[in-house]
Image: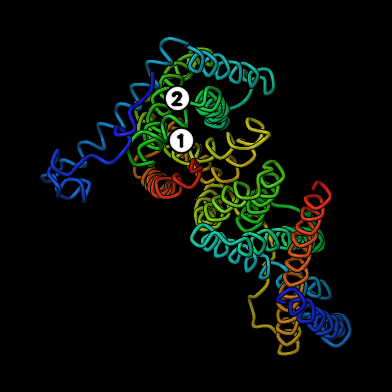
Amino acid sequence: MKVQPTDLSPQPASRADPSEMVARPLLKEGPGEGLRRYLGQVAALVWKDLVAERRTKEILSAMLVFGLLVVLIFNFAFDLQRVEMTLIGPGILWVAFTFAGILGLNRAFALEKDRGALEGLMLAPMDRSAVYLGKLVSTLILMLFMEATVLPVYAILNNQGIRLALIPVILVGTLGFVAAGTVFAAVAANTRTREVLLPILLFPILVPVIITAVGATGIILRGGASDELASPLSLLVTFDVVFLVVGFLVFEYVIEE
Amino acid sequence: MTLSRLGSASRILGVLTTILMVVTLYLALIWSPPERTMLGNSVRILYFHAPAAWTAYLSFGVVALASILYLWRRTRLWDVIALASVEIGVLLTTLTLLSGMAWGQVIWGVPWTWDARLTSTLILWLIYIGYLMLRASVDDPERRARLSAILGIVGALDIPIIHFAVLWWRTLHPAPIAVRPGGPAMDPPLVIALMVSMVAFTVLYIYLMTARVQLELTRDAAEAVRHRRELALGD
């Protein structure tokens, strides 16, 4: 069927309020409307990713199994019966989290690239930063699922108690990870070597997050005072803010073309 | 054309760099006395170590600036400048790490400790190695320039973040038992040698930049000529 050429021409002004055609809303709408619509777009993108994940179960299962394997391998590497767990436990946990997270990040953009879905997203009438936030939130949710499974299994296998204070540390640490990770996963997806390149680009950038997250986790596992946690937590929050702002600003340059 | 002007500037800078480097070598190795308090002759390593570190940071600053300008103006020249500056910066960081290890071996008895500054420098080195690998992995010139500009910006913004994280991390662990320079003020001849070396390395950086940018632009021109010839032969 042939599309009528008139359909492609701009809509005649009589059909819509001219003021609406000139300035596309954000400011013209009532206060908060533009923001609400933006958040709606982000939520739709997150929903899309989660539905796709529920149907394929590709990413979460891979992250989970890999995270558990890392914990298992460390058990043999260090003979965990004999070493002080509070010293190396935080490191084991964050290596498991970040390595499994790399798998998730790679897969998140490989899916979009493989079937040309990214072009579809770019054609959608919304700000490119919504794509960034959508991917960030869906990856964050998947990673939190994975961590919520790996952490208790790790605790049971190594006779460790779980402390609730770990939750905020894992939350802000993972947020920093995906804030920078989403940008570089999109960068890596656009290269020839793809998956191989992501950890090489991302880990040096993320060393600050990993250092402080491991430090804060260590303080909690040792049962350190809560005021000891203040400085690593505030550092982590600062890193999160920096990575979020930079990612937000820079992302549109990654997926342009 | 600008290319030939760049060439003559590069030649002049080359001569200037050679003279300054010879003077630096003389001042650092022969003219200046050994340090009196504790470093002795090992202080001579610092005349190369500190300027290399300074120019390395300078080059990564230039990378960030050129990357921002590239994303803004989209001219090939900014991408070439960023590329040249990363390559030189990685070279200088490597020299910084190696000369630091030589000095550490003499003073600390070990080439490496996980001291805050050493750790930050190593991470920095890895970020820009990654930058070069990223470039090698993208064929389309426009995309390569754009993606590496993003890394150039994020990498530079990461430098203060790494600094703070590593500083905090170091306070958790026992500080390395190390003799640190700079307790008593340095003798004037030592300061002079260091300053001259700083200038020499800065000029060296500018010289290498002009040479590398000229090389890349020449490559571009050669590529354009070949392309035109292929088109002509095809007809």
Q: Classify B151 as above or below A220.
A: below
Say which quarter of the image contains residue B54.
bottom right
Q: Position of residue A157 (x, y in %)?
A: 53, 12
Whichever of callouts 2 and 1 sits on the residue coming sooner in the sequence is: 2
| Dot 2: chain letter | A
Q: Nearer the viewer, residue B81 or B111?
A: B81
User: According to the image, label 1 marks what residue?
Assistant: A178
Q: Position of residue A137 (x, y in %)?
A: 37, 30
Q: Classify A189 as above or below B210.
A: above
Residues tagged by mark 2 and mark 1 found on one chain of the structure: yes
Q: Nearer the viewer, residue A121 or B223?
A: B223
Q: Nearer the viewer, residue A22 or B209?
A: A22
Image color mode: rainbow
Say which quarter of the image contains residue B23.
bottom right
Residue visible at 76% across and 66% down? B212
Work out which quarter of the rendered image holds the N terminus of chain A and state it: top left
- Left or right: where A17 falls relative to A158: left
Q: Is residue A86 visible?
A: no
Look at the numbered disc 2 and give the secondary structure of its residue: helix
Q: Classify A131 as above or below B61.
A: above
Q: Residues within 10 Å of mark 1 (few under 14, many from 20)?
A: many
User: According to the image, label 2 marks what residue?
Assistant: A143
- The circle drawn on residue B14 is none
- Could you tell me how far apart the alpha carbons at marks 2 and 1 are, in whole angstroms? 9 Å
Q: Residues within 10 Å of mark 2 (few under 14, many from 20)?
A: many
Residue visible at 77% across and 55% down? B228
- Left or right: where A136 falls relative to B131: left
Q: Amino acid at mark 2?
A: Met
Q: Amino acid at mark 1?
A: Val
Q: Position of residue B102 (x, y in %)?
A: 82, 61
Q: Position of residue B139 (x, y in %)?
A: 69, 43
> Do tag 2 and tag 1 residues touch (Cβ < 8 Å)?
yes
